[in-house]
Image (spheres, grey):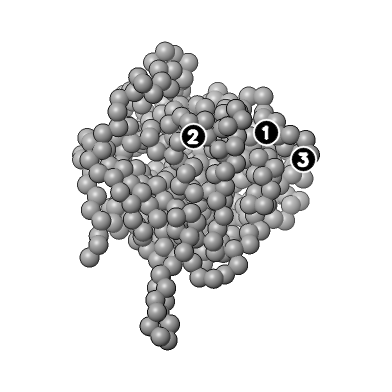
Amino acid sequence: MKKKFDASILPLMAAALLLPSVSNAADISRYDKAARPPIVLTDMGSLMFAGKTDTDEEGNTFHYDHGYVQYFIPQSSHSLPVVMWHGGGQSGKSWETTPDGRDGFWQMFTRAHWPVFIIDQPRRGRAGRTEPASAVSDIPTDHKESIAWNTFRLGKWLPPQKPVFFSDSQFPQNERAIEQFLRWQTPNTGPEPSPDIQERQFMAKSMTALLKQTGPAILMTHSLSGQYGWETAMESPKLVRSIIAFEPGAFAFPSNDLPKNVKTSLSFVGKATAPQVVSPERFRALTAIPVMVIIGDNVVRSESASFGEELWRVNEIRARQFVDTLNRHGGQATLFILPEHGIHGNTHFAFADKNNQQIADIVENFLHSRGLDSTHQYHFQQNLQ
C-alpha cells in the first residue's frame, strides 16, 4: 500500500485521510499483480469458534451455532489483527478476491502486513450447523437479485428489463464479474432476526469467544454486521481496539441522548434503522475507541418508495447522528462519505469496487493516524485445550 502520511500532518483526519489517489503511476502499478511483492506468511489456518452443544436422552451430542474463521499471519506483521465480518446475505467471500479477479481486502491487508481473520458468522456459510429452524428471511435482498442490485447501489434493475449500472459506478461490469458477484449471496441456515437485541448479544458473545483467542483486534464490519460490531465493543471493550464500519445497517445510541426521528414511509426501513438504545455506561465503550464509518456514493436525498434507496437515505442520516453523538460524548469517530471527498461511484461494496486499493489506503491511513499500526510480530496460537 502507499506510503502513509507523516503523523505530524494528521491531527485533523478530515484533511489528512482524504486524498489517497489512484491517478498516478505508482498507484496504478499496484493493480499489476506481477509488479507486487509476494505475500509471505508465518502462519495460516482456520478454526471453529464459540458455539453450543446439546445432548439428548440417549447421550447423542449436537454441536451447533459456532462461527468459522480463516486466518493469515504475514511475516513482519503489525501487532493488531484485523477481523473482517461480512454483511447480510454474504459470507467471508466478500473480503476475498473481487468478482473480476483482483485482490480483495484479504490480500491487500495481508500484503500490507496486517494479520487478517475472515469469518463466516454463526448460521452462515461454513458455520452453517444449527438447530432445525426456519431460516426464512424477511430482508428483501435475500429473495430477489434485482432488489439486491438496487439496494447495493450498483445501479438500477427493474425486471423484465436487464440490470444497468450507474454511469459512474466503480463496480466491475463485465459479464463474468457480474455472475461471480451474484453468486456471493449466501443464505442463513437458521434465524437471524433483525433488529433484535438477543441476536446482537448472541453474535457479540460469539465474536468475543474468537477475540479471546486472537487477543485485542480491529473489527471491520459491513452492513448488517455493523450492529454486531457495536455490540461486541460494548460487550468486550478490552478486546476491540477500533471499528471500521462499511455502511453499517444500524447504530447504537445512549438512552440519555437519542437522535431525532428520521421520517420514512416504509415501515420496514423505519424498523431496521431505528436507534438501538443502550445504557450510557455501555455506550461509553464506543467513545473509547477510534471508529470510522465509510459510506459510498449514489445515496438518494429525497424520500423514496424503493426499499434500497430509502434504506440508505435514512442510514446515511443515522450515520451522521451516530458519529455526532459519539464525538459529543468524547469519542474518536470519523464519518467518511466518499463522494464528499471527491471519490465517486462506490457501491455498498467499496472494498470490492474497482478502486478498492484507494479505499484500503484510506482505512490504513486512519489506523496509522490513531497509532494502531505498530509493527511487532503477531503470533496466533489456537487454544485447543
Label 3 close to label 2 by CB (< 8 Å): no
Mark 1 or 2: in front is 2
Sequence order check, earlier mark of 1 and 2: 2
Q: Position of residue 88 (x, y in %)?
A: 55, 51
Q: Nearer the viewer, residue 22 or 335?
A: 22
Q: Amino acid at mark 2?
A: Thr
- Would residue 345 be seen by someone viewing this image from the given angle? no
Residue, disc 3: 159
Residue at (56, 64) in percent of width and height: 191
User: Which residue is the extreme one toward the top?
Assistant: 25
Q: Position of residue 350 (x, y in %)?
A: 52, 34
Secondary element under disc 1, as helix, strand or loop, is: strand
Residue at (50, 45) in percent of width and height: 222
Residue at (33, 56) in percent of width and height: 47
Quote the CA–CA distance across marks 1 and 2.
Answer: 18 Å
Q: Which mark is drawn over residue 273?
A: none
Classify mark 1: residues with Cα within 10 Å, few (<14), some (14-19) or many (20+). Answer: many
Q: Nearer the viewer, residue 140 or 59?
A: 59
Sequence order check, earlier mark of 3 and 2: 2
Q: Nearer the viewer, residue 203 or 250?
A: 203
Secondary element under disc 2, as helix, strand or loop, is: loop
Residue, disc 1: 155
Residue at (33, 36) in percent of width and height: 110
- In the rendered picture of this protein, how many numbered marks are placed on residues? 3
Q: Amino acid at mark 1?
A: Gly
Q: Which mark is drawn over residue 98?
A: 2
Q: Nearer the viewer, residue 98 or 16?
A: 98
Classify mark 3: residues with Cα within 10 Å, few (<14), some (14-19) or many (20+). Answer: few
Secondary element under disc 3, as helix, strand or loop, is: loop
